[in-house]
Amino acid sequence: MHIRPRRNRRSAAIRALVRETSLSPADFIQPLFVHEGTEDVPIGSMPGCTRWSLAGLVAEAREVFDAGVPAVVLFPAIAETLKTPGAEEAWNPEGLVPRAIQALKEALPELCVITDVALDPYNSDGHDGLVEKNARGELRILNDETVGALCEQALSHARAGADIVSPSDMMDGRVGAIRQVLDEEGFEEVAILSYSAKFASAYYGPFRGALDSAPKAGDKKTYQMDPGNAREAIREVGLDEGEGADMVMVKPAGPYLDIIARVRETTVLPVAAYQVSGEYLMIESAAAAGWIDGKAAALESLTGIKRAGADMILTYYAKRAAGWLRE
Ligand code: PBG
């Protein structure tokens, strides 16, 4: 036998030389939950995650940034009393997210602050878009009216100092509309990271618990993508690219590695992937039960997502994984 692939795996030194994909803390984006309270509260549906007060948020973001993670993405838990059918709180300039952005940019000007643009935390229906109910009680998610609301929301984030706005709602045409509004208002430097291929996934369940944002009726299948579809993801990415997206996203990540790989081949834009709450908790719960090595499984999962073609990964492991990579 002349050809022995195992020669390239013989020692840790050789394996390091031939390794094709390596993780770095700079690959990660840390999702952070924020609420109006003054306490930092552990999230029941997402063990290991916290609903931060504004002060707690800033302290945590500092730790994240010091660990080498360049960016955070904010998710607000909004008081039930502020949720309305029109989701007006989503663009309140004194709302929780604008204040969180300001606090973060003041304390950590070099941290990249990304915001989620979608109505579900603010809307009494729990949908990402505005809802119309017909006489039979059937729901319709209003696309074009929602896009107008999303533009207001994105603008309020830009005014507060967000570096990147990230529409996660899956309405048609929102990237172009947001780009136009941002440019008209002088925010041509604020980037758009579009959730281009966001699938209607069971893996979001724990996240909706974290924000109490589950839909009150119906599901998200008329706007989020069908898990069986790959070509449609390419179509969505192409549209968002044409409308001016600066970066595109595939979500969830682990069950959609083929989509990440195909998107990587069809766009030259940076590709993000979101290792979502359910993926995180599958690893965490198996590790807590003693069934798998959580650290090894988390790093392997993140490596797989990067190997598939992701340039950046939104992950609840961001700070912890950055620490592990330093060990
Ligand atoms: C909502 C939004 C969701 C997530 C991020 N933004 C939930 C949903 O679409 O229902 C999920 C993130 C996760 O599960 O970790 N716009």
Image (cartoon, helix red, strand yellow):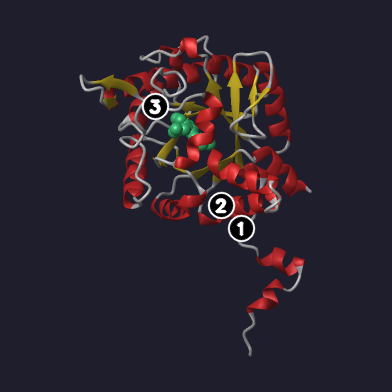
Question: Which amino acid type corresponds to the residue marked 3 in the rendered image?
Answer: Asp
Picture quadrant where residue 69 is located: top right
- Note whether ligand 1 is within 8 Å of mark 3: yes
Question: Which amino acid type corresponds to the residue marked 1 in the rendered image?
Answer: Thr
For residue 276, say whether it is visible.
no
* Marks 1, 3: nearer the viewer: 3
The residue where tag 1 is placed is 21
Q: For this view, does 162 lie left or right of residue 217?
A: right
State the mark number for residue 128: 3
- State the residue at coordinates (70%, 67%): 15
Structural crowding at the residue carrying mark 3, measured as other residues with C-alpha within 10 Å and reported as few (<14), some (14–19) or many (≥20): many
Above/below status of 260 relative to 236: below
State the mark number for residue 306: 2
Residue 296 screen position, x and y as percent: 69, 53
State the mark number for residue 122: none
Question: Which amino acid type corresponds to the residue marked 2 in the rendered image?
Answer: Lys
Indicate which disc, 1 or 2, sits on the residue closer to the N terminus. Answer: 1
Above/below status of 188 relative to 283: above
- State the residue at coordinates (68%, 49%): 294
Picture quadrant where residue 142 is located: top left
Q: For this view, does 149 lie left or right of residue 50?
A: left
Above/below status of 8 relative to 54: below
User: Could you give the CA–CA distance between mark 3 and mark 2, rounded to whole angstroms?
Assistant: 28 Å
